């Protein structure tokens, strides 16, 4: 799975993606927005925890 913290940096430039490991699709539902639940095979890297907590819904 590849993720990025934000779409653009403070200068308006597109940020790159970071590989955080392999994941397995658990469930998905809806459209625009679509809710997807993944199971990571390895723990999430520490530097992404702050932003990831904001996305956790349940």
Image (spheres, rainbow, N blue to C red):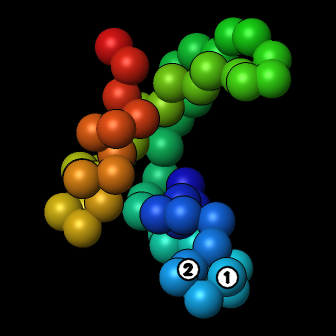
Q: Are marks 2 and 1 in contact (CB under 8 Å)?
A: yes
Quarter residue 15 falls in: bottom right
> What is the quadrant of the C terminus in the image?
top left
Q: Residue furthest right?
A: 31
28 in relation to 5, above or below: above
**Is 52 situated above or below 32?**
below
The residue identified by callout 1 is: 12
Residue 31 in percent (x, y) is at: 81, 17
The one nearer the camera, 23 or 16, is 16
Label ID, residue 39:
none
Q: Quadrant of residue 12?
A: bottom right
Determine which residue is flagged by label 2.
9
Q: Nearer the viewer, residue 14 or 45?
A: 14
Q: Is residue 41 left or right of residue 29?
A: left
State the SS at label 1. loop
Residue 35 visible in rendering:
yes
Seen at 80% across and 23% down, the residue is 32
Looking at the image, residue 10 lies above or below residue 4:
below
Is the residue 19 above or below the residue 38 in the image? below
* Residue 9 position within the rendered picture, expressed as x and y whole percent measured from the top left: 56, 79
State the SS at label 2: loop
Quadrant occupied by the N terminus: bottom right
Q: Residue at x 73, y 24 (%)?
A: 33
- The answer to whether residue 16 of the structure is visible from this angle is no
Crowd band around label 2 with a 10 angstrom C-alpha radius: few (<14), some (14–19), many (20+): few
Residue 30, x across and y down, in percent: 75, 11
Residue 46 falls left or right of residue 38? left
């Amino acid at each position: 799975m590849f993720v990025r913290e934000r779409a653009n940096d403070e200068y308006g430039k597109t940020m790159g993606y970071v590989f955080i490991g392999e994941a397995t699709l658990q469930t998905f539902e809806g459209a625009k927005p679509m809710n997807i639940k993944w199971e990571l095979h390895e723990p999430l890297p520490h530097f992404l925890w702050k932003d990831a907590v904001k996305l956790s819904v349940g």
